[in-house]
Image (tube, rainbow, N blue to C red):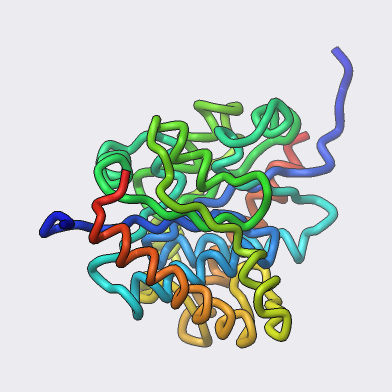
């Protein structure tokens, strides 16, 4: 079997429009995508349904990290159901608990009060990216 | 006449890669938090992808407005995948085309100009929310 080196990791974010953790998830994922631009790529989760073959093979093309805002785990479930099993699944409430942080309370216009949470989640996503890239 | 507990579901794009996805969300939040709280509601689009029973019921039993951020129309198609006809579909870019002096910036969240544009867009969509609430939708 050919040894294929992994250069990019797919990040699938919960979009969580209805909950503050969804906004936190989007902002943290975006931060990692910007800071690790050469090593990460993303897809809009609903494209697994709304998109074509290219979108549905996303998890087959990239080892994938899913990031969910709540225990319904839409990102992990949808990725596994419609594209392929994620390499890692992260859940925001668990991350916040590990860091002794509380969930944000608003849906939009995050500022300094939410910055610690965004940084903590982004750091864990970045660590997961390192681990997935290192596993190769 | 509309039902007593009528709600109008507004579903934005989920994207974190383009400014118009962020504009669609900001517009939705303006509607559900400020302009039509209680009447306009939203849910997480991915809940429809995994067919969460509560989210599916909300969408299939109420009028639905989608605001998409790109031509792939994830929000509209996610609703249609449930066999539901969207009552009104918007593309966020058209709000900018109608207000060229307000060019939004930002990807995960829009900037101050984007917020102003979202306020205008939400004002326009609020009229459609009222109309659908009165008619009951499809």
Foreground residue, B49 or B1? B1
Residue A65 figure quarter = top right
Residue placed at 42% from the left, 63% from the top?
Answer: A21
Residue at the (45%, 60%) spot, across then down: A22
Residue B52 shown left or right of residue A87 in the figure? left
Relative vertical location of residue B77 with respect to residue B90 in this rendering, above or below: above
Q: Is residue A107 above or below residue A59?
A: below
Residue B48 at x, y = what percent? 41, 40
The foreground one among A116 and A48 is A48
Residue A100: tell me if it is visible. no
From the viewer's perspective, tell me whether residue B50 is left or right of residue A133: left
Image quarter where the N terminus of chain A lies is: top right
- Residue B102, image x and y in percent? 68, 83
* Residue found 75% across the figure and 30% down from its top: A61
Q: Quadrant of residue B95?
A: bottom right
The image position of residue A16, as x and y in percent, is 44, 56
């Amino acid at each position: 079997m050919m040894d294929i080196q992994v250069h990019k990791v797919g990040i699938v974010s919960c979009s969580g429009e209805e909950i503050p953790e969804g906004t936190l998830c989007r902002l943290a994922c975006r931060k990692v995508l910007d800071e690790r631009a050469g090593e990460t790529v993303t897809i809009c989760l609903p494209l697994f349904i709304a998109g074509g073959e290219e979108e549905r093979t996303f998890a087959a093309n990239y080892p994938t990290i899913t990031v969910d805002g709540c225990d319904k785990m839409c990102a992990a479930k949808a990725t596994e159901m419609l594209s392929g099993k994620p390499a890692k699944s992260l859940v925001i409430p668990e991350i916040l608990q590990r860091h002794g942080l509380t969930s944000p309370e608003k849906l939009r216009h995050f500022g300094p009060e939410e910055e610690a949470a965004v940084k903590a989640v982004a750091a864990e996503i970045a660590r997961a990216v390192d681990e997935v890239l290192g596993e190769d | 006449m509309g039902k007593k507990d009528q709600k109008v579901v507004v579903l934005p794009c989920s994207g974190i890669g383009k400014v118009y996805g962020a504009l669609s969300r900001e517009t939705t939040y303006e509607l559900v938090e400020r302009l039509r709280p209680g009447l306009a509601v939203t849910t997480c689009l991915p809940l429809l992808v995994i067919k969460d029973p509560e989210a599916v019921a909300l969408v299939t039993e109420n009028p639905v407005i989608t605001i998409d951020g790109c031509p792939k129309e994830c929000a509209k198609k996610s609703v249609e995948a449930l066999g539901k006809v969207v009552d009104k579909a918007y593309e966020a870019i058209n709000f900018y085309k109608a207000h060229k002096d307000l060019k939004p910036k930002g990807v995960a969240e829009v900037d101050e100009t984007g917020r102003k544009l979202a306020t205008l867009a939400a004002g326009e969509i609020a009229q459609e929310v009222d109309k659908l609430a009165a008619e009951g939708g499809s």
